[in-house]
Image (cartoon, coloured by chain):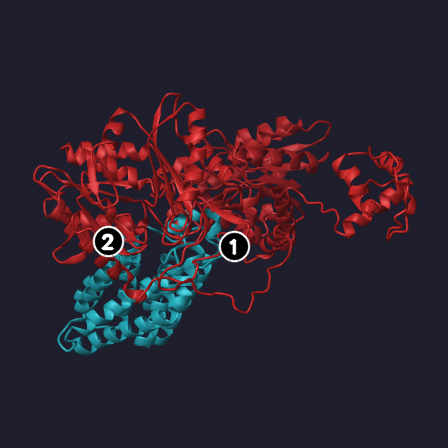
Chain colours: A red, B cyan
Amino acid sequence: MASKTSPTGKSTAGKTGQTDVADAMPLRYGDDPYVWACWLYYEEGRTQHDIAEIMGISRATVNSYLADARSRGIVNISLEPSRLSSLAIAQELKRHFGLLDCLVVPSDDGSRTLIDRLGTAGGQAVAKLLKSGDTLAVAWGRTVLAIAGNTAVTGLQDVTIVQATGGTRASFAYTPELCASAMAEATGAKLINIAAPAIVSNAEVQSAFLREPLIEEQFAALGRANKALFGVSSLRPNSTIHTSGFFESVSIQHYLAKNAVGVVAGRFIDPQGRAVAGPLDERTIGISLDMLQKIGMRIAVAGGFDKVPAILAALRGGFINVLITDAATGRGILNADGVTEVDQRLAQRTRGEGPLPLPSNVRTHIKKFLNNPDQVVDEMLEGVLKAHADYITPIKGSNRALVARKGPRAGKVGLVIGGGTGHEPCFLGYVGKGLADAVAVGNIFSSPPPGPILECARAASGGQGVLFVYGNYAGDVMNFEMAAEMAQEEDIPVRTVLTTDDIASSPVEDRDGRRGVAGNFFMFKIAGAACDRGLALSECEAVTRKANDRTFTIGVALEPCSLPQTRRHNFEIGPDDIEIGMGIHGERGVVRDRMMSADQITDRIIDRIFGEMNAQPGDRVAVLVNSFGATPLMELYILFRRVEQRLSAKNITIAANWIGHYCTSLDMVGASISILHLDQELSDLLLYPCDSAALRIN
Amino acid sequence: MAESASRFLSRMFQLIAMAMQAEKDHLSELDGAVGDADHGITMALGFAAVNSAVAKLDLDKAFPSEVLSAAASAFLDAVGASTGPLYATAFRKAAQVLKQDESLSPAGQVAIVEAIAQGIKDRGKGQRGDKTMLDAWIPAMEAAVAARERGAEPDEMWRDIVAAGETGANSTRSMVAARGRAARLGERSLGHVDPGAASAVIILRAMRDTFS
């Protein structure tokens, strides 16, 4: 063992001059006692006392070896990255906004909700900040109630909790009364409620209430508060302010029109944190912004990126001097205020050193097969129409609206698909018998205008109506909607299914807001089969909708794509980074992560999909492993291998699979995995025969 | 008035097209931060198409409303995407307003700005604070209306309109996108000026240079 003396007993007379140590040192440490000490300390977990014994030196020498090893770079101590970044963000927020203190909880680990994590952090902060003799004003909201639920403070004396606003009806759980009383209970404090409604019908009622001796007394207590605890609400449609109905009688539009961005303790503020005057001022009973500002310690607990503008406004207005938030929100606040130092510092930390100087022969342009960059779409279409003349032909001579040669027929619902180019073989590869009847072709990554879409609807119509199926993007929706209106005017009934299979693009509560990506492949196949089988328009729509609801996709990009016009990357992905939740337009993904192995990436994706797909053992699925353009089949098969392992471990059967280029994003390096959770009807339609340029099933 | 008014609009679209061409890379760069990096290309393409459509009109005979209608159709057919329907609806709405009064009096200029903002709002179903081109157009419209109400001179009016649009566009930096592709980026859209708001300012500046 390491403690044995070297059998040779020969002195190597190392640079350190510590010949006695070198004598005892096992060969593998060379002549460096620092490395030996570090090995024993960090890898074997021994105490400095043990190490001194093993190495035959004094404990003080061990101590100095360990200290020097850090400065010599033999040992690098690093904090776990997510903790490091929350600490760095907290420090930067504290510095930038001159806060008393700031606590940032690490970003989502997926296991607990944000409100819950903020509640725990808030509870810890209250336990640390609340002292005997304090008067704490407590506002209301989901977050405040979560804090009360996570607070347990004992041993304080003479603490008073004052409700910061009047009360509300109990149409929601986190009323002002409940928030204040829960906090009083959690801290063993005396409770003072405000015995008036938060909002009264008019100014007379307000002044009458405020003149009441009881209310006056309660307000006096509020005026004595030396600490305040509150949340910050945004004015976004799903915020507390809307869902609670707190301001039900008043149009929030009034405040929005005056540029209000947030609400603090029931008061509206603008982006600079100034009060926004409005009709509620003379009807509100509660702490005013002036009163709040006079309180010594003002603790705000708020997170969620939709709240960034509101929190920033509250910080600028000086309403907050202790902020508790999460890492993503904190970084968002800093970015929104133009502070990017923290990003740079974290980037440097993770990369080890600063960016390398570019060599003089660095490439700035991506090589592409081009003639005229402005003509790429038209030239491609000329090639496509020659190559696939058996399947598709232009409508009225325009290559931007193509119809299937063996598609439309009388009595059949017509299927029209379409979108921007750059996704080949999407969308025009899926036009043919048993698939789409017509496709409208836009510019690169841009929706086609209504004109060609309308031509497609006309060409596809067989008298039984037309189904539009396309990805959920603002541009496509507007153009297809305009075309649908025009078609209806010509008595062509149109139904629409927006594809929303990208589960990374928005949380499950906002399913309708998700975008459509490679899962389009499945929706086109199902819709095409339904139409070809002669189902009615409403039935075709229903089954396509079902396929969309049961299709789950996540994409990962390793390198960005480049547009033919610019021949530059749309943005950069760092040498050790990947983008998870990548769309198909070269837009950034949802989160950036470090590069990992193929199996780890697949597991990340599959875990997310399993989280939403309610599949039981014995169920059947179809799998699509799709290249974004530049990723070769070899790697796609590696991904598929792991997908299959994960599915079979759950005893889920892969009834069909496709691996290759099905919905690309120019030359992006990356791939997406789509899973369609089958039932009998979807199985039948999926395997129903079809024949098009990109897909044939016999 | 009809002839010279139509020539004014034709001149306006030329200025917009030139500015879009000049700012193409800058706009695409802004878009690269939050979208698919093609906004500059799209806007340059769209206004080039508008120019060639307007060039086909007989400006001595065409009414200003006809110029705007032609611009709407040309822009839509050339662009598609999301800016296509938005500006097409905006110009079409402006054309409808101009039919009431084909002179391009200061009041008529205000009406155009109002109609553009309203058209974009209607088609995109958006509002202020969504981090879109509306964050430039709505303040610009408000400044235009305020200038009309106090009877400001055209020069002063356009100075106010452009300043309001610029401030509005810059304010998108601290907004989280609620619409369009950038909406999927969540907090990562922060810190970046919305490219649609930036190109709206380019249009406003070209309008100012035409009318004042």
Give above or below for A145 relative to A633.
Answer: above
- Chain ID at mark 2: A
x and y, in percent, of residue A609 in the image: 42, 33
Q: Quadrant of residue B54?
A: bottom left
Q: Closest to the observer: A163 or A359?
A: A359
Task: Check the image and name the residue furthest to the front.
Answer: A8
Give above or below for A460 relative to B91.
Answer: above
x and y, in percent, of residue A685 in the image: 23, 31
Q: Are marks 1 and 2 on the same chain?
A: yes
- Chain ID at mark 1: A
Q: Where does label 1 land, which residue?
A: A336
- Nearer to us of marks 1 and 2 is 2
Q: Amino acid at mark 2?
A: Val
Q: Which mark identifies residue A616?
A: none
Q: Quadrant of the C terminus of chain A?
A: top left
Report helix, strand or loop for mark 1: helix
Mark found first going from the N terminus, 1 or 2: 1
Count every numbered label the image shows and give the total: 2
Asked whether the viewer can see residue A52, the reply is yes
Q: Where does label 2 land, which residue?
A: A441
Q: In the drawing, does residue A547 fall left or right of residue A483?
A: right
Q: Closest to the observer: A483 or A225?
A: A483
Q: Closest to the observer: B33 or A512?
A: B33
x and y, in percent, of residue A160 in the image: 66, 32
Q: Amino acid at mark 1?
A: Ala
x and y, in percent, of residue A130 in the image: 69, 36
Report helix, strand or loop for mark 2: strand
Tag 1–tag 2 contact (CB < 8 Å): no
